[in-house]
Amino acid sequence: MSNSKIDKIQIQNMMTLRYDPRFETILQKKTVKHMQPEGNDTSGKKTEKLLKDSLKMKFSLISKPKCVSLSSGIDSSLSLAILRKLYPNEKITALCGVFDQSNDESKVAKTIADKFNVDFKIVKMPSIFKNMAEIIWITKKPRWNTYTHIISKEAKKLDSVLVTGDGADEIFGGYTFRYSKFLKLFKNNNDWKVRTKNYFECHNRDWVPDQNEMFGSSIKFNWNNIYSYFKNYFSNSLDPLKQVFLADFNGKLLYDFIPTSKAISNYHNTESFSPFLDSNVINFGLKLPTHQKYSHNRKIGKLVLRKIAKRYDIPHIENKQGFSPALWIDWERNGKKLFDSLVMTEKANIFKQKLIDYNWTISSFEKLSQDGDIRYLNRLISILALEIWYKLIILKEIDHNHRF
């Protein structure tokens, strides 16, 4: 395939945002009117009822066994607790993914599973680099956050519907570290572009300070083009955090997390479901006032969900990370060698096609070895994914079962 047939804007967007916001989404995008504060739920009982109704409706339509993707955080734990409340006598299985040498939340997850009398299984997650071709094949895009398909694969073995906590962070205010940083940067007289730049500072693992130098000459990277995608979210009369909630919902949730989950389900021919993504839950949750989601003084979020979790006495971890790989360890053990063999040569496709700048890549690889900046590690892994994507999707030199 010639360079001219490659969607270079998509590559630019995915290498900067992790997604491409130009296309239609599975769920409807939200506007300012969907975020206007309306009603309240200080006890969490209204939200709890909506979550229950969502799960009851789902399992009235499908009679498969039930399993839950269980980390140790409030979202998946709450999904499990409510599911058990609704179905006290049915067998439920909790699946907990654990990466080698990563932050292991399985002990707390096992405690939660035992509390609600469900079967518990630890799923060993392989190196993301050894299975990179399969990870990329799932979405057919140069991305590497589909490694949770291993959990879906286990659910397939159980012939189960996989229940998750997806969407709770975006709808009920779970990204507390971003909210705190955004509010510190915020000034009333900031225009939409400054607010957008501040928002990007709260997502700075997705890009690097010299992002414009990363791309090759065939991609005309321009920060203003990237910022323009966010104009509607930050040029309105919503309070600052509501603007952030709007950008979060219409960004990574709609264009990254939900499509990724859907692609994984399609790949394994399984079904996954999150009660937090029920339309009634979304519409109610987005309209809740900010102070019922996030406490600026205490720097904690998901206040409504905490009220529900307290009634269920759920022993969740406060700062959970979910099923996250130990990137540095995996990189040192597997990624660096693969990067060196596939990318560290001017003959790599991404350099021949002038998608990525060769000199920037060499310099950043050396920089990473010197200062260990996680932001550059993320960029180099994305560049590796782009090269493998090119070999897999464009040239068809390898297939999705290829193991590195």
Image (cartoon, helix red, strand yellow):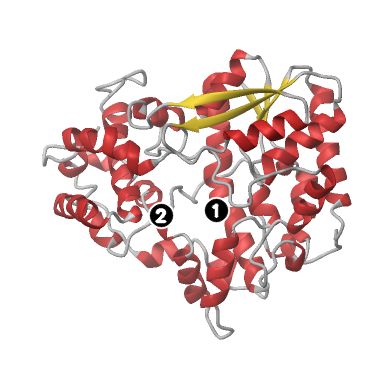
Q: Give the quarter of the figure containing the C terminus.
A: top left
Which residue sits at x=41%, y=40%?
A: 326
Distance Cα–Cα, label 1 vs label 2: 13 Å
Against 144, residue 292 (above or below) is below
Q: Position of residue 369 (x, y in %)?
A: 21, 51
Q: Position of residue 347 (x, y in %)?
A: 11, 37
For residue 269, which numbered disc appears in the image?
A: none
- Residue type at mark 2? Asp
Q: Sort mark 1 into few (<14), some (14-19) or many (20+) by Cα contacts within 10 Å.
A: many
Nearer the observer, disc 1 or disc 2? 2
**Residue 85, image quadrant:** top right
Which residue sits at x=41%, y=26%?
A: 126
The residue pinned by badge 1 equals: 251
The residue pinned by badge 2 equals: 206
- Residue type at mark 1? Gly
Horizontally, is 5 left or right of 272 in the view? left
**Most foreground residue, 219 or 110:** 110
Q: Position of residue 172 (x, y in %)?
A: 70, 55
Q: Earlier in the sequence, mark 1 or mark 2?
A: 2
Against 329, residue 357 (above or below) is below
**Residue 112, image quadrant:** top right
